[in-house]
Amino acid sequence: MKGNAMQGHLKQEGYFPHIDGLRAVAVLAVILYHLNPAWLPGGFTGVDVFFVISGFVVSASVARSSALMGWRGVLGFYARRMRRIMPALFVCLLVTGLLSTLFIPESWLSETSGKTGRMAFVGLSNWVLASTGNDYFSPRSEFNPYTHTWSLGVEEQFYLLFPLLFLGWVKGGKGRGLSMLLFALATAGSLGFAISRALQGGYEIQSFYQTTTRFWQLGAGVLLFQLLSTRARASAVDGQPGIWHSLLQVVCAVVLGYGLWTARPGHSPWIDGLWPVLGTLGLLALLHRSATGWIGGCLSLRPVLVIGRMSYSLYLWHWPVFVLFRWTLGLESLVSGALALLCTAVLAWVSWRWVEQPARFGRRWRGSDLRWVAGGVLVLLLGMGLQKPLERAAKYISLSTVSRHPLEWYPYAKGLKKEFPECELVFSRQPVAGGQVQQFERGKCAGGKGSAQRLFVAGDSHALAYGEMLRRLVLLDGGQARLYANAGCAFIGLQGRRQADPGCDAYVRNTLADVTAQAQAGDVLLLPGLRVPRLVEQYSLFDHQQAFVTVNSDASAAQRKVDVEAAIAELKPLAERGVRIVLEAPKPVLGAPPFRCSDAFNRHNPICVHGMTVSRERMEALRAPALSSLQQVAQALPGATVWDPLPVLCPGAECHPDDAGKPLFFDGDHLSGHGNRVLLPSFRTHRAALHR
């Protein structure tokens, strides 16, 4: 009887321990998944559990206080949401922004992080992630310290709509039926939209992040509250729950656990998000009546409740901590994982104790609802505005050598105005079939226009990596350079990629058509590309021994033969017209990416385990088959040559990532800005020799 009295008291006060217990389950599932997906493969659907709980709890809170009566009531609702979400989020985003500036350099892995962080202040990061094509399970999302804010964006957008749909419920009478109808229609519409997107295919990224496909999970929580409230008013108080009640709790817990274990990437929110939603709805309904039994008891244990009460702060901080560990010490070992969890717990407790709780309940933080809403919006906009200057300050305050010396690492050539004050570089983007081409020309220059010869450069991302060299060539020699590039699509890949990629084939056709329409006799077509297996990716290691096995296999030899014949057929018309074809020989590929392994704080990251140095002998052996194939192509085309950067980049017995302390490579195989400058004299000499 004493326990039942206490439970009734808690319900009257609006506190349900089992809800904090469910929050604990949700946040622990998400944290375990993010720490190691193998530990709980479907743990990312813990966010789905949060959505259901949020819809249920916000409905109970508003209904209990009749908070939506009149415009002041609506303003009060937004003020309470602001107090609940904004302070801790603001602090977390600013601290994350500072730490990111200190430790994370700009790269492909982090190129959307800044925008995601800025939009997180105003609850729009989910739409940013959906529009930029960053799959939740992709490397760029795993290395983005703001990815987790997508779910906060969904909730914040839901709260904007909530008062409009829930107002009738607070007014009572027929308004309750209208509110239920509105939520039922909105929930059914969102669910139907999510199902249709899943059946159509191709919308996995948008469906995961967007509010339109997630509303049904929050709406289900609201409808559950409304149904339970209606039932409670329409029926007498039930007696003590029986054995069937306990069995149903177990069934719902099993359904929830099934969803958290079996959910698959690319199948959320439908259909794999259905099971966590159903399990959560069932437990909320059953425990709302009586939080007794084994399940209710477990969810109400003190350690579980502590985690549940801190779940918001734990969710906020765990992801930035994990991402910063990935960028620095690594997150793969048990020691680094334990340290990351400890950092998460400490930061979450500090945030909960000194930011989250005082903002919600402290007297010093009290103020009018209007002040909270207006002030909160201004503070968030201020935080959003601070993010960009913070990113720009990386050159001065970052601990990363990449960020402190951007002109050495990035092939952007942003400092050319100081080096060539008497010359103007004209840059433009020209449309071509299926894409764009970057064009560089020398404008006004004290030395005149120089050569009228045009240079065409076409290839994969390694063509883009020559951006600085091309700009310098134009300023030094005049003429025009046109750069065509499609990441992962080399003209002569020699790795069997083009055969399975129609998009790459289309790029090659369109580029050749444009070069054919514009090139004249004497012009040069440079074809760079990655033609040997990578030894490391920016975010994962490869088997070095397997790379040698692959290039020397019969299947690779057969594919190279096909690629050689195709290249000769495609390029011969241009060569016969007098266009000079220059084939880039394979450059060195390193065992570790320098931009991630060149600082004291990241040098021992697991991504660096193979070291950044590779022997010249091994490199020559790795590239020998591809080099032989390129030489066959050059011999079959009139005037074609092979330009070999390797002797310049690797003059000794070891291929190093740097030249007298300055980087030659950005990652495991793309050139740095300094690497461009090192290769410039070699290519100028090779190009000049073509016309002797």
Image (cartoon, rainbow, N blue to C red):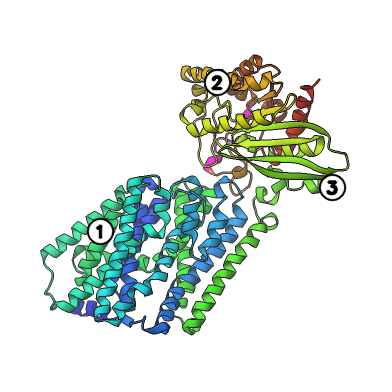
Left of 432 or right of it: where is 365? left
Instruction: Residue 278: give its label.
Output: 1
Instruction: Residue 421: give its label.
Output: 3
Of the two numbered discs 2 and 1 on the same chain, state the one appearing first in sequence: 1
Pointer 3 with pointer 1, Cβ within 8 A? no
Image quadrant in which you'd find residue 237: bottom left
Dot 1 lies on which element?
helix
User: In the image, which is nearer the foreground, mark 3 or mark 1?
Assistant: 3
Residue 237 visible in the displayed image: yes
Of the two numbered discs 3 and 2 on the same chain, state the one appearing first in sequence: 3
Q: Mark 2 sits on what residue?
A: 566
Residue at x 28%, y 52% (from the top left corner): 259
Q: Position of residue 321 (x, y in %)?
A: 50, 56
Q: Position of residue 653 (x, y in %)?
A: 68, 25
Q: Nearer the viewer, residue 258 or 66?
A: 66
Amino acid tagged 3: Pro
Pointer 2 with pointer 1, Cβ within 8 A? no
Q: Position of residue 162 (x, y in %)?
A: 37, 71
Mark 3–mark 1 distance (CA, rounded to whole Å): 67 Å
Instruction: Residue 358: give its label.
Output: none
Q: Position of residue 122 (x, y in %)?
A: 51, 66
Left of 678 or right of it: where is 246? left
In the rendered structure, which segment of residues is drawn in magenta? 606-615
